[in-house]
């Protein structure tokens, strides 16, 4: 089980910025702290936080977004990797009974344990660039899924999440199978301290109750997707052959049965076509689940 800091009886007042000014952000942890109130407002508006909501915040940093969530949410759990920042946030909110601070790596934490087995919570995060994709995917693929996610990521990652057929990548498929993403706004480097060297974006994902594609094995579905994108510049017939370790003739047969032109490339497939291809793949026992 996750160990939460001890709880105290509390009132949710406006809290003073309590982190030591001598604290220096670590590049290795992707620590770029949001300071722009307009962007903060955009995040809160997109998340539509209310007192009915159970909210998870990943990477709260110095608590700029956390303080706003404390005022709006019914319950808030924040997950911070830095021991210094987690300790400071715990001290700041130790009198708030509806706020819990967990020192952990969101790429490894037990999600259902974190949320008490519930689904339908809200996920809000200013994610470190290096960990954004794996964290988003873990929560989308979890048994205990959020109802929506509002995340800050690098602009290029955001664009891949929302890409349409013709420009899709593995992350596009991995996001859109589980929810409907849209870009809320772009965020310039000056909105952070220290300023990153890249432009960021806020993305909202409305998570589906059930995946858009029916599969009996997520791992095998994504084995297929990774295989198709193994050589993304090659035609699907060749990319699938390389990625799945099957002959070109077998890859061609799969595509014909799925009704997909073998000369196309993986980035052009729609979710419906991925579904058709998976159904064919799933019924090829000689090559499936090796």
Image (cartoon, rainbow, N blue to C red):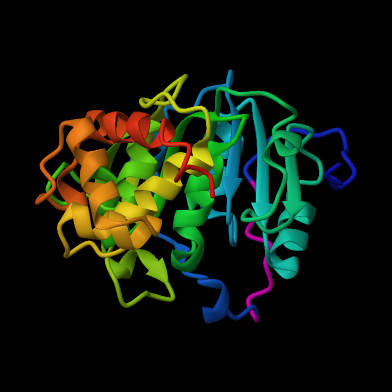
Q: Nearer the viewer, residue 77 or 90?
A: 77
**Residue 54: x %, y % from top left:** 62, 27
Residue 78 lies left or right of residue 27; in this view the side is: right
- Residue sitting at x 67%, y 40%: 111
Q: Nearer the viewer, residue 87 or 144?
A: 144
Q: Nearer the viewer, residue 129 or 142?
A: 142
**Residue 283: x %, y % from top left:** 41, 30
Q: Reply yes or no: does residue 20 show up in magenta.
A: yes
| Location of residue 246 (image quadrant) | bottom left
- Residue sitting at x 86%, y 46%: 3
Q: Reply yes or no: does residue 70 show up in magenta.
A: no
Looking at the image, is 30 positioned above or below residue 216? below
| Location of residue 261 (image quadrant) | top left
First to last magenta residue range: 15-22
| Location of residue 83 (image quadrant) | bottom right
Residue 10 lies left or right of residue 125; in this view the side is: right
């Amino acid at each position: 089980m996750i160990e939460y800091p001890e709880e105290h009886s509390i009132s949710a007042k406006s809290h003073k910025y309590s982190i030591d000014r001598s604290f220096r952000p670590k590049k290795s942890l992707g620590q770029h702290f949001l300071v722009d109130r307009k962007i903060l407002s955009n995040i809160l508006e997109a998340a539509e936080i209310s007192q009915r909501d159970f909210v998870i915040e990943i990477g709260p940093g110095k608590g700029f977004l956390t303080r706003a969530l404390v005022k709006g949410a019914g319950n808030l759990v924040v997950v911070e990797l830095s021991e210094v920042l987690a300790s400071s946030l715990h001290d700041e909110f130790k009198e708030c009974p509806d706020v819990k601070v967990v020192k952990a790596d969101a790429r490894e934490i037990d999600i259902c344990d974190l949320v008490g087995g519930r689904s339908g919570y809200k996920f809000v995060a200013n994610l470190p660039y290096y960990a954004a994709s794996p964290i988003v995917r873990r929560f989308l693929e979890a048994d205990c899924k959020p109802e929506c996610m509002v995340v800050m990521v690098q602009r290029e990652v955001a664009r891949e999440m929302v890409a349409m057929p013709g420009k899709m990548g593995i992350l596009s498929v991995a996001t859109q199978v589980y929810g409907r993403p849209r870009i809320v706004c772009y965020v310039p480097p000056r909105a952070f301290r220290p300023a990153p060297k890249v432009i960021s974006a806020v993305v909202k994902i409305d998570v589906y109750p059930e995946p858009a594609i029916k599969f009996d094995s997520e791992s095998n579905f994504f084995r297929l997707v990774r295989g198709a994108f193994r050589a993304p510049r090659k035609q699907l017939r060749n990319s699938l052959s390389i990625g799945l370790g099957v002959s070109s003739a077998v890859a061609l047969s799969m595509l014909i049965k799925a009704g997909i032109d073998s000369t196309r490339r993986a980035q052009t497939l729609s979710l419906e076509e991925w579904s058709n291809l998976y159904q064919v793949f799933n019924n090829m026992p000689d090559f499936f689940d090796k």
